[in-house]
Image (spheres, coloured by chain):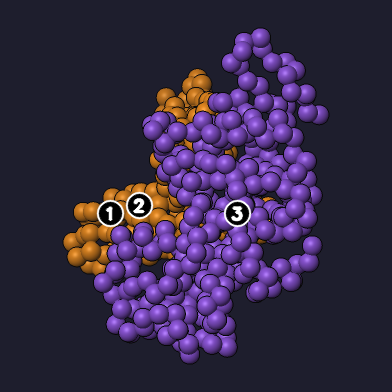
Chain colours: A purple, B orange
């Protein structure tokens, strides 16, 4: 039973108490056991700041979204595709309450080998484009939708070579994306799609030689992951969660390791204005047709 | 008073260690020490053990799984050393690399929807040995060690155990 806000709170003005009897259940999809280490650190951080959370791990986004919809979870750390799925199943009765600064304003690139002489998207007609897993927003859904917007229809105007690695995890890992690039590298495709952050990382660490590859086209901006709650999640619990979340500071040495592991410099309020392109992709590519709400 | 070798004098009181090994059983005590660690007391020795499995490479404690893998590797390495001394075989350098895999580590973490189990699936041990002896001598030593290894016999019945020996000239 949830205690009413204010009960058992000490007289001290600055003291907070956050429903220790019932920790906030936060769901996350786990594709690598090492990611559990990050969640342990986050859990301890929240505990230290008097807001108990318990991390619940799922093997894929479909069952995590179902858990959120059915009320088994309070907060879901959703991929952008999972956000759209939750919004669809809850008929809009949900909120995106927070995200990483790095989840905002991302782009994906369609890259090609410099030597093959392709100069623009129109040159992709009749060619093969390697993409990530079928449910990867950044490496498949959004790039293909971007090409559709330019009048290039997959399988009609160009061939798609897809790498369905760990389907269900929405491309969280980079397996499919990396395999798509490797396909291009082997000249088995004429172009491949990848997230801008991976282009930056791979040109830095030598995976991609920036002299041999170039960006052919870049998608419009889109947003990525967000913490999602149902509309009926109590506001006071949400505010308590956000209060603690937003106390993380990149310039605090105690927080930096945790934030580096999570890939952010700041937590920011959630927004959904950056999901338009993905929403178009979902509709155009009939992503949820197999799973009607 | 002449005694048969191996028979303790009647007035000797068996030690805890003797009692622990009586009937060919080994009894250890394992005590929780807080901080999600335990101390193992084995005869007059003790050692600390961390979590059953740990995915944090910076964690300060040796996990239970690492102890098991270390025990397997040590069984081979020390088994060879002990036999080499008995057979008067010269070994100049000896070490092993142990690589273990779980069936599905995500089940240990309780990931909903995962299948499989958190148990060990496979262990590969490669032993590197430098010796001036003939290769046939070393191979005979290796085979004898395997035949007499308690942990090899235990684990090969349960998991995939790949053991190999590389003799370095």
Disc 1 and disc 2 in contact, CB within 8 angstroms: yes
Read off the residue under disc 3. A273
* Sooner in the amino-acid sequence: mark 1 or mark 2: 2
Depth check: give the residue in front, B5 or B43: B43
Read off the residue under disc 1. B94
Q: Secondary structure at mark 3?
A: helix
Query: Looking at the image, is mark 3 or mark 2 nearer the viewer?
Result: 3
Please determine whether, in this image, residue A26 is positioned above or below residue A216.
Answer: above
x and y percent of residue A158 in the render? 51, 86
Mark pair 1, 3: CA separation: 62 Å
The answer for which chain carries disc 2 is B
Question: Crowding at label 2, few (<14), some or many (≥20) Cα neighbours within 10 Å?
Answer: some
The answer for which chain carries disc 1 is B
Depth check: give the residue in front, B47 or B16: B47
In this rendering, would A168 be left or right of B21?
A: right
x and y percent of residue A81 in the render? 63, 60
Asked if residue A221 can be seen in this view, the reply is yes
Asked if residue B83 can be seen in this view, the reply is no
Q: Secondary structure at mark 1?
A: strand
Location of the C terminus of chain B by quadrant is bottom left
Q: Residue furthest bottom?
A: A126
Disc 1 and disc 3 in contact, CB within 8 angstroms: no
In this rendering, would B121 be left or right of B135?
A: right
Question: Crowding at label 1, few (<14), some or many (≥20) Cα neighbours within 10 Å?
Answer: some
Residue in the picture at 42% in, 72% down: A217
Depth check: give the residue in front, A56 or A287: A287
x and y percent of residue A227 in the render? 62, 46
Read off the residue under disc 2. B77
Residue in the picture at 72% in, 15% down: A8
Location of the N terminus of chain B by quadrant is top left
């Amino acid at each position: 039973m949830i205690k009413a806000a204010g009960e058992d709170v000490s007289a001290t003005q600055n003291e907070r108490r956050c429903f220790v009897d019932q920790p906030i259940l936060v769901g996350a999809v786990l594709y690598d056991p090492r990611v559990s280490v990050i969640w342990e650190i986050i859990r301890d951080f929240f505990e230290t700041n008097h807001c108990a959370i318990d991390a619940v791990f799922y093997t894929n986004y479909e069952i995590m979204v179902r858990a959120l919809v059915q009320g088994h979870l309070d907060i879901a750390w959703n991929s952008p595709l999972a956000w759209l799925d939750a919004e669809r199943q809850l008929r809009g009765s949900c909120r995106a309450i927070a995200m990483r600064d790095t989840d905002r304003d991302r782009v994906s690139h369609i890259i090609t080998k410099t030597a093959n002489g392709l100069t623009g998207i129109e040159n992709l007609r009749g060619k093969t484009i390697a993409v990530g897993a079928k449910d990867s927003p950044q490496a498949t859904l959004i790039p293909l939708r971007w090409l559709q917007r330019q009048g290039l229809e997959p399988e009609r105007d160009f061939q798609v070579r897809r790498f369905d690695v760990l389907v269900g995890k929405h491309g969280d890992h980079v397996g499919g994306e990396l395999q798509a690039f490797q396909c291009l590298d082997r000249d088995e495709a004429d172009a491949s799609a990848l997230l801008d952050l991976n282009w930056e990382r791979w040109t830095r660490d030598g995976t991609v030689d920036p002299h041999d590859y170039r960006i052919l086209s870049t998608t419009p901006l889109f947003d990525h992951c967000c913490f999602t709650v149902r509309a009926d999640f109590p506001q006071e619990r949400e505010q308590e969660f956000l209060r603690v979340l937003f106390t993380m500071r990149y310039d605090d040495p105690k927080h930096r390791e945790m934030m580096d592991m999570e890939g952010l410099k700041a937590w920011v309020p959630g927004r959904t204005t950056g999901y338009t392109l993905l929403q178009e992709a979902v509709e155009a590519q009939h992503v949820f047709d197999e799973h009607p709400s | 008073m002449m005694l048969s070798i191996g028979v303790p004098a009647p007035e000797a009181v068996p030690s805890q260690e003797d009692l622990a090994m009586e009937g060919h059983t080994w009894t250890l005590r394992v005590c929780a020490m807080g901080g999600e660690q335990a101390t193992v007391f084995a005869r007059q020795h003790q050692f600390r053990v961390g979590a059953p499995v740990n995915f944090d490479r910076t964690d300060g404690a040796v996990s239970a799984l690492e102890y098991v893998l270390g025990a397997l590797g040590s069984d081979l390495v020390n088994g060879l050393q002990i036999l080499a001394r008995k057979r008067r075989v010269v070994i100049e350098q000896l070490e092993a690399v142990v690589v273990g895999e779980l069936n599905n580590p995500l089940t240990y973490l309780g990931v909903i929807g995962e299948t499989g189990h958190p148990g060990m699936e496979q262990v590969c041990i490669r032993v590197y040995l430098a010796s001036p002896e003939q290769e046939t001598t070393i191979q005979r030593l290796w085979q004898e060690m395997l035949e007499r290894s308690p942990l090899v016999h235990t684990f090969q019945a349960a998991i995939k155990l790949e053991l190999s020996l590389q003799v370095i000239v």
